[in-house]
Amino acid sequence: MWFYNFGLILYVWAIRLVAPRHPKARLWIEGRKDLFRRMREAIAPTDRIIWIHVASLGEFEQGRPIIEQLRKTHPEYKILLTFFSPSGYEIRKNYKGVNYIFYLPIDTPGNARRFLDAAHPEIAIFVKYEYWLNLLRELRRRKIRTYVVSAIFRRNSVFFRPYGGMWRQALESFDVMFVQNEESKKLLATLGFDNVLVAGDTRFDRVAEIARAARRIDVIDRFKGDNRLFVAGSTWEPDEELLIRLINDNPDVKFVVAPHEMDESRIARLMAETKGGALRYTQCTPRTTYGSRQLLILDTVGILASVYGYATWSYIGGGFGVGIHNTLEAATFGLPVAFGPNYENSRRPAIW
């Protein structure tokens, strides 16, 4: 366990080192300043708390159906939502569906105790993953009911390695593990866990709701006109290299590209290398004329799911890196979905 704690210390040092030059790292540090004081001031000792933890924005969307159902069925509880990543917290820090939103502190033994003292949850829910060993140990010591939902386990993960003992022990903190598929249940059975239920992926609930609630967007209406539209979501630089060629080879098609991160240099490249002309969504006004301009860069958050409703085809980024992002938002509209070659860790929807 000592090398886990030492590794976390090195991780924080590394983030502090790059923070002056890296906006995301700076947000990670600044968002945790005076965290425990702010929690104590916000959360009353008499509050009955359900704590839900998500890593980032994608896991938030997975957890959102659970949050909304808990609000309806258990109004006696207040909901505490925590994020690990700035890319989730900074976008959803004003979400009105919960009572409290904070960053999760780095998982040292002392921080785990201070966090649970301030939050005093009756129930803890982890979405998909984020197995923080000190927090899970402290939850188990305090006998707090703890669950993981939409979890997925693979044979090559650390739990099934010879050196994965402390990770296997961490799983003992969960009263029930709600997993996405039968394979995960069978793998956990080999470790002796029988408190496992196959409950599917809550992203399916969320994207079905998104499709029903998809809204009309004036900018997209006017940009698309009567043309066919290709929408590329959550793109990275290798994706964009291919997309620039695709855009320039198909001048009769309109394109919307939504980068995964708003990197100004990449946006500038898309703008400069698109022969048919490009615009940024945030610079469009009711007076903007789109004409034959071929590319609209979606440099904002919160509307991509609705934009897929306009598309003829879709592309999901990340498949030339660690793995593709969520395909379900596009697939729920019945679109053809393309992506890069690294998709082995993504569970395929039943409609594929």
Image (tube, helix red, strand yellow):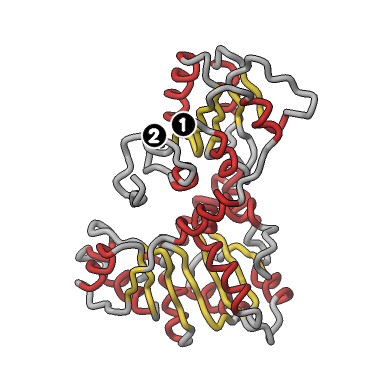
Q: Quadrant of the N terminus?
A: bottom left
Q: Residue at x 45, y 18 (%)?
A: 245
From this view, report whether residue 45 is shown above or below residue 128.
below
Is 113 or 173 nearer to us in this picture?
A: 173
Query: Where residue 134 appears, x then y in whole percent?
Result: 44, 73
Give the CA separation, mark 1 to mark 2: 8 Å
Q: Quadrant of the C terminus?
A: top left
Q: Which quadrant of the view contains residue 259? A: top right
Q: Residues within 10 Å of mark 1 (few under 14, many from 20)?
A: some
Q: Is residue 277 left or right of residue 106?
A: right
Q: Residue at x 49, y 72 (%)?
A: 125
Q: Which quadrant of the view contains residue 223? A: top right
**Of callouts 1 and 2, which one flags the residue occurring earlier in the amino acid sequence?**
1
Is 320 or 335 nearer to us in this picture?
A: 335
Q: Is residue 341 left or right of residue 223?
A: left
Which residue matches tag 1? Answer: 313
Query: Where residue 103 appears, x then y in whole percent?
Result: 60, 62
From this view, report whether residue 181 is shown above or below residue 39.
above
Badge nearest the viewer, 1 or 2:
1
Query: Where residue 295 appears, x then y in whole percent?
Result: 58, 22
Q: Residues within 10 Å of mark 2 (few under 14, many from 20)?
A: some
Is 312 or 19 nearer to us in this picture?
A: 312
Which residue matches tag 2? Answer: 338
The reply to whether the C-beta atoms of the residues labelled 1 and 2 are less than 8 Å apart is yes
What amino acid is found at the position of numbered circle 1 in the picture?
A: Trp
> So how many labels did they put on this image?
2
Q: Which mark is residue 93?
A: none
Query: Where residue 351 appears, x then y in whole percent?
Result: 36, 48
- Of helix, strand and loop, which one carries label 2? strand
What amino acid is found at the position of numbered circle 2 in the picture?
A: Ala
Q: Residue at x 57, y 35 (%)?
A: 310
